[in-house]
Image: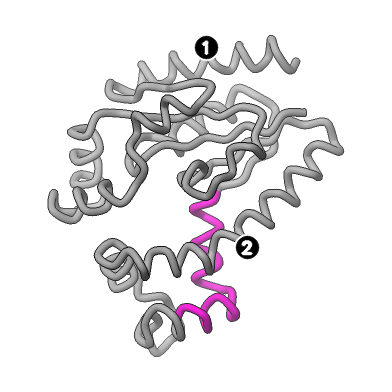
Amino acid sequence: MAILGITGGIASGKSTFRELLLERIAADWFDADACARELLDEDLAIKDQILQKIHPQAYDGEGKPNRALLRELIYQDSAKKRTMEAILHPVIRQRWSRQALEASAARRLFVVDIPLLFETKAESLFDLIVTVACSLDGQLARLFSRRGLSPEISQKIIATQMPLDVKMARSHHVIWNDGPLETLTAQTELFSRYLHDRYG
């Protein structure tokens, strides 16, 4: 069975598309962002590396990650960002790759929601890649309304990511998510039918 990668930019709608898609197809799935959060919260080896290589105050006295500090560090210091990625991404890839093998053995479609699919040079590991994209104005509006991030911080975050037009050009399919939820739902319905026709 196929391995499907869903990628895009911050606040472009990847997770919403994934949720809508999984309502319409039979598939196992993996959320790379959720895995990263879990590793930050619970993995002691990851915690030690971050304290040593990123910042000695990256965790509070209760052992919880200081997400505001980490966000500020990685989006203002490209070296810190690369270091953080080098700590997290090999473990994340190992986890989803193992689950993909299990899904393949069970002859099930496997969906990976992975924002940094191209940045981590993982495209050769997928049979299909979908980029969920929207306009810059759409990203900024969602980051403000849903996360309370200022336009300045939002622009910095977006600037650190691979441009969406590059991701779209390198993908097999593109979902354009600049309209209402109904439009995204309609596109998801069409794509799910394509998957049914191709993979059963």
* Position above or below: 170 against 163: above
Nearer-the-camera pick, 164 or 98: 164
Colour mode of the rendering: one colour
| Furthest residue in direction right, as rendered | 105
Position of 89 with respect to 110 (left or right) is left
Q: Mark 2: which amino acid? A: Val
Quadrant where the C terminus sits is: top right
Residue marked by disc 1: 190
Secondary structure that dominates the magenta span: helix
Is residue 86 inside the magenta stretch? no
| Distance between mark 2 and mark 1 Cα atoms | 34 Å
Q: Mark 1: which amino acid? A: Leu
Position of 156 with respect to 30 (left or right) is left
Q: What's the mark number on residue 112? A: none
Q: Which residues are magenta?
A: 32-50
At numbered mark 1, what does the secondary structure look like: helix, strand or loop?
helix
* Position above or below: 74 against 20: below
Name the quadrant containing residue 57.
Answer: bottom left
Residue 164, image x, y percentages: 35, 33
Nearer-the-camera pick, 125 or 16: 125
Which residue is pictured at 69% across the width and 9% down the height?
197
Viewer-side label of 2, 1? 2
Residue 183, image x, y percentages: 36, 16
* Position above or below: 17 against 91: above
| Label 2: few (<14), some (14–19) or many (≥20) C-alpha neighbours in 10 Å | some
Quadrant where the N terminus sits is: top right
Residue 51, image x, y percentages: 44, 84
Which residue is pictured at 36% across the width and 68% down the height?
79
* Position above or below: 22 against 157: above
At numbered mark 2, what does the secondary structure look like: helix, strand or loop?
helix
Residue marked by disc 2: 91
Which residue is pictured at 51% across the width and 28% down the height?
130
